[in-house]
Image (cartoon, rainbow, N blue to C red):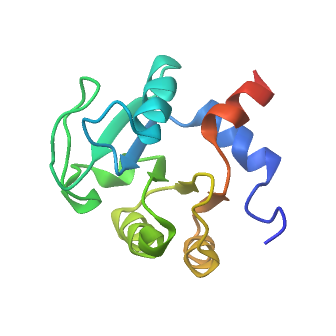
Amino acid sequence: MGDVYADPDVISRLLDESRTWAFVGLGDNPGREVHNQARLLQRRGKRIIPVHPSGKSVLGERGYVSLADVPDGSEVDVVGVYRRAEHAGAVVDEAIAAGAKAVWMPLDVVDEAAARRAKDAGLDVVMDRCPAVEWSRRH
């Protein structure tokens, strides 16, 4: 994989210029890492959209069962793929179909075939990187 999906310019742009992040896997359990990442970005001015099979609201934002259920899904700048790697491909395909502009797969979520599909569809891709770590490196 190398750093092909860890381009510093792409990472900086996504962290600095994005407005809306849909977090797939964000439920109402504050003990999960996805909750910490969503809260961090929310505190830094990002709108977050929880996407979880429960559809529950999280961190004061309305939740949705799937990316397809998010109104105006094309306004999602980044889809955070907080599912195990074996489920990442399906989430990436949903992100492409929803018109997202980028996908971010956190540490240990690696699916090179899904990343290639996203890039081929014109999305920016970050894989196997932590938003909090990358934020602290840049700010």
Quadrant that contains the N terminus? bottom right
Q: Is residue 78 left or right of residue 61?
A: right
- Number of numbered discs: 0
State the image coordinates of residue 32 (x, y, percent, origin top left): 40, 39
Residue at x 25% of width, y 31% of height: 58
Q: Quadrant of residue 47?
A: top left
Q: Quadrant of residue 27?
A: top left
Q: In the image, is residue 119 above or below residue 68?
A: below
State the image coordinates of residue 53 (x, y, percent, origin top left): 19, 56
Quadrant that contains the C terminus? top right
Residue at x 40% of width, y 67% of height: 91
Q: Is residue 96 left or right of residue 59?
A: right
| Nearest to the observer: residue 92 or residue 1 | 1
Q: In the image, is residue 123 above or below residue 28?
A: below
Residue at x 81% of width, y 46% of height: 8
State the image coordinates of residue 22 (x, y, percent, origin top left): 38, 46
Q: Quadrant of residue 95?
A: bottom left
Q: Residue furthest right?
A: 2
